[in-house]
Image (tube, rainbow, N blue to C red):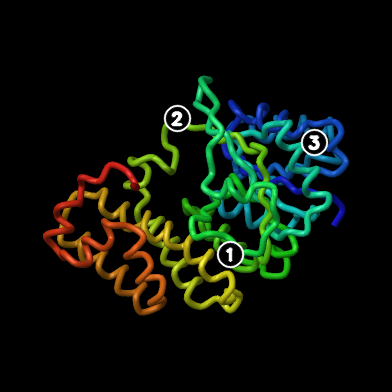
Amino acid sequence: MEKLLTVSIASYNVEAFLRKTLDSCIVPELMDELEVLIVNDGSKDSTPEIAREYEAAYPETFRLIDKKNGGYGSTVNRSMQEARGTFYKLLDGDDWFDPEGLKSLMEALRTSTADYVISRIRYCEDGGGKETVNDPRWAHLEGQTVPVSAIDLEFTPGIWHTTVRTSILKEHAFRLPLHTLYTDQLFIVNTLIWARSVQFLSCPVYCYRIGRDGQSVSRESRIKHVDEEMKVVGRIVRLYAESEGITEENRPAVRSRVNLYYYYALVTLLLLPPSRETYRRYRSFEKRAKALAPDLYRSAGFYAKKVLAVRLGGWPAYRHFAGKVENFN
């Protein structure tokens, strides 16, 4: 490995945001240890031209990778192959780093023995407004490095919190599906399976832009892309059921994360107008999960009241919830 940290920036038509993203990686004392891969996913705007400016100005840090459009997963696939850093972190082309947080992260990585490093994020309103540091449920572990088995069952990191040791990506290589949303969920599960220790930092590093139209977490987007979400979560359930990397020590933490994705998928089906076809799809998904991973099926029922209610109440309970669910609580 030639660098301490590889940052993979998925970039598709982000000319309005990319300079802010790349500027947040320019911290003079870190440049020698930082590799920034700007993966241009077939943009039709000036995204690649902006990236070339930074590559020319900082050739030892920034590198443009041009590729045909394949969706978010394809950008991660490519950067995982090319990463030269000891650690690896994802950054979307419309988000950015807190420079002071990046300094703190790099300082921690220099001596870290962990497979996973978890840091706080800022939720930032699009177009300005207040930046709020979230209060993660694992705050009581901040400042510690612990085995995965020591993590409580509310351990639910997203890609925005996570920095992963690159050797996991190299030794247990996986590929994410193309032209599919929600592949970040597969990334988290694939890497968490092989992690044996986690370090928790108190510094906010990632600044996540909220309020943009069409974001994949919006109600409208989840309804539009329900087939993609069900495809991804179906793969996650199978991965959980069949992976040889899940030890008994880390199974509870992995199951906790998979539970959340499982629940989100079922709730997305409940966002749709009620119909017999959707109900059959809901039941079919649950039936497959129960056959593949009975422990996951059982725990998902206790994880969320809606899931348990539909299981026990059948079609009447489904009709009660379908089309009326407003959020994932």
Which numbered disc, 3 or 1, marks the residue that appears first in the sequence?
A: 3
Q: Residue at x 28, y 42 (%)?
A: 326
Q: Residue at x 25, y 53 (%)?
A: 270
Per the rendering, the mark at residue 55 is 3
Q: Judging from the image, what secondary structure is the residue with disc 2 in?
A: loop
Residue 227 in the figure: left or right of residue 237: left
Q: Amino acid at mark 1?
A: Asn
- Between 6 and 64, the one nearer to me in the picture: 6
- In the image, residue 140 lies at what x, y percent? 59, 48
- Between 46 and 240, the one nearer to me in the picture: 240
Q: Amino acid at mark 3?
A: Glu
**Image quadrant where one finds the N terminus:** bottom right
- In the image, residue 299 lies at what x, y percent? 38, 68
Which numbered disc, 3 or 2, marks the residue that appears first in the sequence?
A: 3
Q: Residues within 10 Å of mark 1 (few under 14, many from 20)?
A: many
Per the rendering, the mark at residue 190 is 1
Residue 100 found in image quarter: top right
Foreground tag (3 vs 1): 1
Label 3 and label 2: CA atoms lie apart by 30 Å
